[in-house]
Amino acid sequence: MSMIRESDRSRIPKLAADPQDRGGPGTPLLSVGGLIKHFGRTTGLLSQGRSVVRAVDGIDFEVAKGETLGIVGESGCGKSTTARLIMQIIVPDAGDILFDGEEVGSHALSLGEFRQQAQMVFQDSYSSLNPRLTVEDTIAFGPRVHGLSRRTAIARAHDLLHRVGLEPSRFAGCYPHEISGGQRQRVNIARSLALEPRLLILDEAVSALDKSVEAQVLNLLLDLKEEFGLTFIFISHDLNVVRFMSDRVMVMYLGKVAEVGPAESILALPRHPYTQALLASMPSMDPDNRTQEAPVSGDPPNPINPPSGCRFHPRCKVVATLCAHSEPAPHDVGAGHLAACHLANPESGHPRLAAA
Amino acid sequence: MAAIADALTRVPVKASRGYWTGVVARLARDPTAMVALTIILVIVAAAILAPLIAPADPYKGSMIRRLRPIGFPGYPLGSDELGRDMLTRLIYGGRLSLFIGVAPVICAFVIGSSVGIFAGYLGGRINTLLMRIIDVFFAFPSVLLAIALSGALGAGIFNSIVSLTIVFVPQIARVAESVTTQIRSRDYVEAARISGAGPVTIVRVHVLGNVLGPIFVYATGLISVSMILASGLSFLGLGVKPPDPEWGLMLNTLRTAIYTQPLVAALPGVMIFLTSISFNLFSDGLRSAMEVKQ
């Protein structure tokens, strides 16, 4: 079942003919199916039967060419693990990852070829830069690995520095500790672009920056996206930032997809109680309209032993007995908007549906 | 785009102060480390230039001028139990003492770092296996291990270097492994992996530069231990053989004179102490100079 409908595609900017394009404009750039990663299973002699953390527990989604998919959720819901699974830094336990219609790691698309086309920007701008390498060497590293001469690679690094707004003559020879956090994140972005990727995964890429710098970097990302014809997966816990960046939004809860769909639809009319609570928890710009009580109370349950049925049911305001033993399947509520809640499905038998 | 890139390459890039330049600058501002370094350099220079600066022949004794006190005419630091000039023998003794003190640490640095970085970078079962084997060596006190190995291999300079190397390899490997394990999980190593780099390239470009510094500091600290152990082996008759001058051996042969000429008998010990503590203080200074930026 495709989660992207033709009506959505009209919003996505038309891409210029990309020589790397294989599947054509109709094929999603990234298609993830049944992705599962449980941690703590490969154990030694003495720790057999140890509990398993269900970090990512069966998620499906697609990213169309040229769009930005925002992924939101609480800490520990599996956002970053999903990013690392897509990049194959962590090997998934199960699931298919199709890039432009071809399976990653297969004969048609080797891991090396995939990694040239998909890159990632990390959250911590300090630990993602080698303290012993200058800015230009950091950016030129990828191209040099792929066989470019040092001169060409450095020239490309200077060009990219220029594009991310750092004057090469001033910044190329700097070490990471000599530049600010915002500048380091620009270097990270330049590094991720050095291999001319098509997909860029931004894992909380602006979360560690202060607000004014964050806005600059977000605008830079939007400019670069247009300039290079990129597709973004934008991971954040900040709904305002996700709203600003994304065409579509995916809400994750405890390793599962709670809701996914077009950004306007999800943010204006959320169907999953968890998304509703997340939106209600956003501080309002209007002082008369303050949030008086926390919409979701408590911490997310332990992913080692997730709740039965719907994973959100212990914290849900509209919980019914049905929710504790039956897991809701994603239900299409229109225009490619899917919600994994019994209330979204008229046939689920949730008591509140009958009352309405 | 190519034209822009070409134009940009011609812009002179401001050469930034590298990491090691900063370390050296901070080290130069540390008076203790500088004094220690000066003492080390003087002792090393004296050992290298021994034939030029030593006032006498280190092997030529005199039966009638034995155990002269410090300051005796012709013997600035007295003479030993065979009437040989102490100053000359201390200068020449530095050659062997430094050599059998430093050589094991260098060998252990090369072997231990390779093992530790290999194990740390691979991680998993291979790491566990290698590290548990290395743990076996930690069951023995290093002095006992050195004596046992030297005893088994037989006396001699080469064998004492081999046995001291075996003593130090596990210690350096353990430090190398723990530092590498830390570096391996940094985001920049993951970023390098995403860039498509192979393990050898990643270790060469991203791991070595960040790992060798801390290992080097640790190894500098080991030099003093190594010198004391080497002197100890010579003292026990397992290292250098008489009549070659070596501080540990000299301490041993002069111990009979401890009641007649205590100051002269203590001189080789003073040299061992001075050199060891200088290496230790220098290593401490290096550590704090390197800690400022990561």
Image (spheres, rainbow, N blue to C red):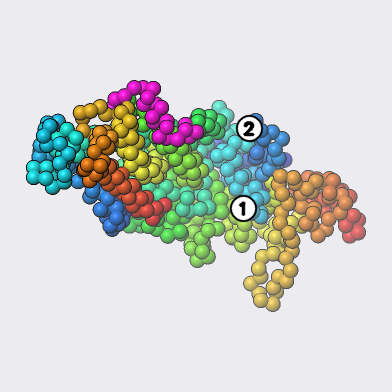
Tag 2: Cα neighbours inside 10 Å, few (<14), some, or many (≥20)?
few
**Kind of residue indicated by mark 1:** Gly
Which element is circle 1 on?
strand
Q: Which residue is label 1 attached to?
A: A70
Q: Main secondary structure of the magenta part?
A: helix
Q: Which residues are magenta?
A: B137-157
Q: Quadrant of residue B229?
A: top left
Residue ID at (29%, 45%): B273
Tag 1: Cα neighbours inside 10 Å, few (<14), some, or many (≥20)?
many
Q: Which residue is label 2 attached to?
A: A44
A323 sits to left or right of A302: right
Q: Position of residue A276 (x, y in %)?
A: 74, 60
Residue B154 shown in magenta: yes
Residue ID at (54%, 45%): A199
Q: Position of residue A7 (x, y in %)?
A: 68, 50
Residue B234, above or below B281: above
B124 sits to left or right of A34: left
- Mark nearest the camera among 1 and 2 is 2
- Give whichever of A134, A169 is nearer the camera: A134
